[in-house]
Image (spheres, coloured by chain):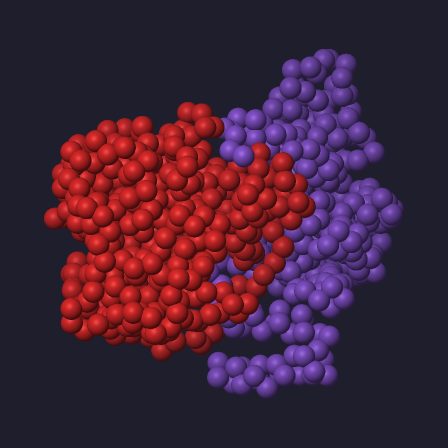
Amino acid sequence: MKAIRTLFHHLRPRFEEGGPYHKLYAFYESIETVFFGPVERSEGLPHVRDSLDVKRFMALVIVALIPHLCFGIYNSGLQSRLASGLSTDLLPVIWSGIWLVLPMVIVTYVVGFAWEILFAVVRKHEISEGLFVSCMLFPLTLPPGTPLWQVALGISFGIVIGKEVFGGTGRNFLNPALTGRAFLYFAYPVSLSGDQVWTVLSGARTTVVDTFTAATPLSVSASTPAGQAVEETLHSVGYGALKLFGGLYPGSVGGTSTLLCVLGGLFLILLGIASYRIILGGVLGVLCTGALLNLIAGPDSAPFLSLNPFYHLIMGGSAFGIVYMTTDPVSATHMKHVKWIYGFMCGMLTVLIRVFNPAFPEGVGLAILFMNLFNPLLDHIEMQLRMRRRMSNV
Amino acid sequence: MISVRTAKGYDLPIQGAPLETSQTIALPATVAVLPEHIPFVRPRLAVAEGDRVAVGDLLFTDKTNPRFRFLSPGGGRVDAIHYGPRRVLREIVIRRDAENEPVTSLGRPLDGDAIDRYPRAELVAHLLAGGVWPLLRALPYRDIADPEQVPPAIFVSLDHREPFQVPPARYLENNRALFELGLRALKRLSPTVHVHADAADRAFCEAHQELITHRVQGRYPADDPGVVLFQVRRSPEENTAWFIDGQDLLLMAQLLQSGAYPTARLFAVAGTGAAAPRYVASRMGAPIKDLAGEIGCRDPRYLVGGVLRGYTGDPEGHMGLYETALAVLPEPGDVDFLTLFRPGPNKPTYSRTFLSALRRAPLPMTTNVNGGRRACIACGYCADVCPVDIWPQMTLKSILAEEVEEYLAQGLLDCVECGLCTYVCPSKIELAATLQAAKHAHRKEQA
């Protein structure tokens, strides 16, 4: 510890006013405060301040996401080797997974951090930690094996257009990670949609082995022929409810496991970081919409309408989106009660997009981005209602 | 007795509460008045350095309202007049005569019946001349009450939830009759007089139940007069109610009873940095050094008036007119290694992100801001603690955008300046100071 302190003590003057690297002070400061908590004397009203800062707030979200990253590494490796007909021993699976996933994560962080530093230096402010969460979320929403240049482009779009042009973390109105994800989806549909993109073949194979289902549960559901129940079709290709809940099926890197989302969501709610109103609202939105579709489904309608609503929560990225993407406090509603509406609408739109829009098999990301746009309006409405109820004091 | 419940608020888990001992220290060699910390007063000096003054002699008046007179809490010689930047009048220090301290008479002594018969205008004049009128203050700006007005109500505040204040049981112990005399005087000033006390002091509320009109339940600052008003008001006209602290009401009563300027004060001395946290009986405007006694930390900060709302006192300076609390906290010293990764069983926090959230033990605190300043991330903690239901983060944005009508409609003037929003903010935004500044600017515009 002493050695590290001496090192920082030694380095600090070079980054301070007059030092050769003064322009990179924001970068230096962000590293130093990871090791040593910042010291600044308060000015009063009040003289004491809470121990919680934004760094810890965001770091805890990353802690909640680490199981998803580990799971993503394992699952990507597993699906890749299953599709290629290779052995599924633990170590080779992890090794394959690491090669598939870690480069994406590293590229995301390097590129995202570079943009943040650039903006911090030009704007002369400190590096905001929201970036680290966005950079962790972004690769988890991508298919494993996304070309790295696309990863770099996507996170650049997310950070710069989704956040920095509006003034950085706290002033953005869209979720930066989802903005980048949506950009890639629309800019490179070939490499980011369809059944073939979700698994990466290892070795010399060019086609998946016959016993392996490369289609994601969502595309299986959407293409269920009329007259057949979606649950049975899913079951027949190996997607039982438990498997879907656990998440070991082809899909985005970190978003497939509803089990981990439940645990992560509980962790964040217990710590008071994620709003339970949004998460419960989102879950309710999915279930209510699913149930409503069940009611209106006739014998001639698409089988997707009659799907058990709970399947919408365990398939694809809806759980991941609801737990980690809707709850980004900056792009969510800022007022308390409309959080229910925001969450509910996110869940509802997710299901509607899935069921009624054949162009988009997954709808959660677009649903959240769409609702992000409405949040200022929802906040305004709640604020107006509160102001009207309040006894005037002018 | 009416029960008043405030759901929001927060009790700071801070270490260093005063021990249950009282101490009377030798009368201080110097006492002072600090015009800088009397709200909205523009002082016009009536004395010069070297002048002789008696207890109760005029030191200065207010330029805006010359009827506000500020009197000397000590008899002797004006030792020094300290100015701050831009000639702000900081301190008028009086060196007391060691023996036979001269005292000026400020009118004839009155008893309760005489007060009941006293015409209101004459009583007001009596209190103004006696220098205790400034102890009466008006909401929402917390400035000195306007003697030309009749307030809709006066709140007598027996509040002490902010760390660390003198609990009313201590100063009311032998002064109940005096307190009642004060209440009779207040009733001449306003048709409605409320006395509110913290319901958590059960024994105290029982013992004085004929005096107390409102029993307040809730965490800090539930017992602040502004919060009580927010809870009990029925119409907007009540917003301009007056308030007076319990100990200050005793001073007012003492003036009426004795005809001399009252100067006795009971102080709470506390905080992590105070070696002997305790209650100290001394004189109004006593030197901070005398009160603080032994200091238990290397780099102390003296907080006059409380940990949350107080101001930083000069260690060589004196207590102000209103303040009866002195807290000593250490300035932040060595930085913590890898704080980010520690579970933090000893880190005080409102959130649930440290292990300390699992236990409600008093914890040591410093004056460290504990983090870098960031843009608001809309965590909503500030709105969760605001006792008067303001959404500080939204109001802050309205203030920065200069949307005057909007921030007033959001309840800016209800703000009791408790400081909790700034305390809980993880982005370390100076919410309370910004709201307070906006309130002060608004008052200036009204004038």
Q: Along the line of sight, which residue is nearer the eye, B443 or A25?
A: B443
Q: Colour of chain A?
A: purple
Task: Name which residue lies at 21% across and 32% down.
Answer: B116
The residue lying toward the viewer, choosing from B222 and A4, is B222
In this view of the protein, which residue sits in the foreground, A257 or B206? B206
Residue B428: name its quadrant: bottom right
Residue ID at (57%, 30%): A387
The number of discs equals 0
Locate residue A40, reporting x and y percent: 51, 69
| Vertical side of A221 occupied by B76: above or below | below
Residue B117 lies left or right of residue B44; in this view the side is left
In the displayed orientation, state which residue is furthest to the left.
B174
Front residue of this view, candidates A239 and B19: B19
**B318 up-or-down from B156: above or below:** below
Chain appearing in red on the rendered image: B
Residue A299 sits in quarter: top right
Up-down: is A200 above or below A341? below
Q: Residue at x 53, y 48 (%)?
A: B440
Give coordinates of residue A376: x percent, y percent.
68, 37
Q: Is residue A243 visible?
A: no
Q: Quadrant of the C terminus of chain A?
A: top right
Q: Is residue A14 visible?
A: yes
Residue B423 pos. (x, y %): 46, 54
Locate residue B216, reporting x and y percent.
Answer: 30, 37
Picture residue at 48% right of the left edge, 84% below the top: A2
